[in-house]
Amino acid sequence: MKNYSKQREAILTVLRETDTHPTANWIYEQVREIIPNISLGTVYRNLSELSRNGDIISLNVGDGFEHFDYDTTPHAHLHCKECGCIHDARLECDPLAELSKKMGFMPDTTIYVAYGICQNCKTTN
């Protein structure tokens, strides 16, 4: 991670300590407990740079919000259309990255999102 800052480290700490895929506003509220005078703009700028540098993943699941993920290893995301939760699913390999490389394309990242109903919502409906 380049350009270390207290704000960036606090944002990474918040992301590292959650297994959800939070929005910038949620991250901002959590970081404010560490750095009370941080601005929402500072959080957005740092999230953008961290994502651009590949330190975190920016994820859009179609719910109108940008979500963030600390885990940059190849994995899929399972998005529940009922409750909105996003779960990680481990991948044995990254088939899209492998196909891309065979075609001479070097992907920075691949993002997989499966949409459906989670186990919890399925059993309560």
Image: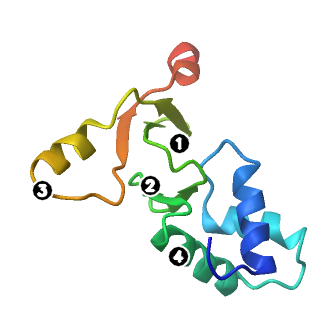
Figure check: 6 above or below 73 = below
Q: Label 4 belongs to which residue?
A: 48
Q: Label 1 belongs to which residue?
A: 84
Q: Do the residues labelled 3 and 4 touch (CB within 8 Å)?
A: no
Between 39 and 4, the one lying in front of the other is 4
Q: How far apart are marks 2 and 4 (CA)?
A: 19 Å
Figure check: 112 above or below 12 = above
The amino acid beneath tag 1 is Gly
Mark 1 vs 2, N-terminal side: 2
Q: How far apart are marks 1 and 2 (CA)?
A: 8 Å
Q: In which quarter of the image is the N terminus?
A: bottom right
The amino acid beneath tag 4 is Ser
Q: Distance between the residues labelled 1 and 4?
A: 23 Å
The amino acid beneath tag 3 is Gly
Q: Which of marks 3 and 2 is in front?
A: 3
Residue 104, numbered label: 3
Q: How far apart are marks 3 and 4 (CA)?
A: 28 Å
Q: Distance between the residues labelled 3 and 2?
A: 33 Å
Q: Are marks 3 and 1 in contact (CB under 8 Å)?
A: no
Mark 2 vs 4, N-terminal side: 4
Mark 3 vs 2, N-terminal side: 2
Q: Label 2 belongs to which residue?
A: 63
For image coordinates 62% across by 77% down, the residue present is 2
Mark 3 vs 1, N-terminal side: 1
Q: Position of residue 51 (x, y in %)?
A: 50, 68
Asked whether, in this view, residue 53 is left or right of residue 41, the answer is left
Residue 9 is drawn in which quadrant? bottom right
Between 52 and 114, the one lying in front of the other is 52
Asked whether, in this view, residue 61 is left or right of residue 71, the answer is left
